[in-house]
Image (tube, rainbow, N blue to C red):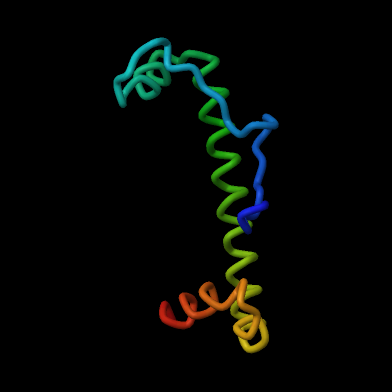
């Protein structure tokens, strides 16, 4: 928040946590999910829930920027976001 970010929390106070089973492979979670590991299933459910929440917040912020672009564009903290939205169409 100090840097102008908008915090969006998952179920845990520090986001979504997972265990890699001491493997560095990019496919670790896929393999654990295919093996129907319950901890991995819970982790993936948390990731999906957080992703849905993030997309919802992004939609709300974007629609708010569109609805109020005329005066938000005059505020330095929002200017670049409004300009970016204007360029995107």
Q: Residue at x 54, y 16 (%)?
A: 39
The quadrant in which the C terminus is found is: bottom left
Image coordinates of residue 85 in percent, x first then y, are: 49, 76
Q: Residue at x 63, y 58 (%)?
A: 4
Q: Nearer the viewer, residue 63 or 45?
A: 63
Q: Residue at x 61, y 55 (%)?
A: 3
* In the image, residue 80 above or below residue 26: below
* In the image, residue 63 above or below residue 51: below
Q: Residue at x 65, y 80 (%)?
A: 75
Q: Nearer the viewer, residue 11 or 74?
A: 74
Image coordinates of residue 31 in percent, x first then y, are: 35, 18
Image coordinates of residue 43 in percent, x first then y, are: 54, 25
Image coordinates of residue 52 in percent, x first then y, are: 58, 48
* In the image, residue 46 above or below residue 63: above
Q: How many marks?
A: 0
Residue 33 falls in which quadrant of the image? top left
Q: In the picture provided, is 9 more to the left or to the right than 86?
A: right
Residue at the far bottom: name it.
70
Residue 27 falls in which quadrant of the image? top left
């Amino acid at each position: 928040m100090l840097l102008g970010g908008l915090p969006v929390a998952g179920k845990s106070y520090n986001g979504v946590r997972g265990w890699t089973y001491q493997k560095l492979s990019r496919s670790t979670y896929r393999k654990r999910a295919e093996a129907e590991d319950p901890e991995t299933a819970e982790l993936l459910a948390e990731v999906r829930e957080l992703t849905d929440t993030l997309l919802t917040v992004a939609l709300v912020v974007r629609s708010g920027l569109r609805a109020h672009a005329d005066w938000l564009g005059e505020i330095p903290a929002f200017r670049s976001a409004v300009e970016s939205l204007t360029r995107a169409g």
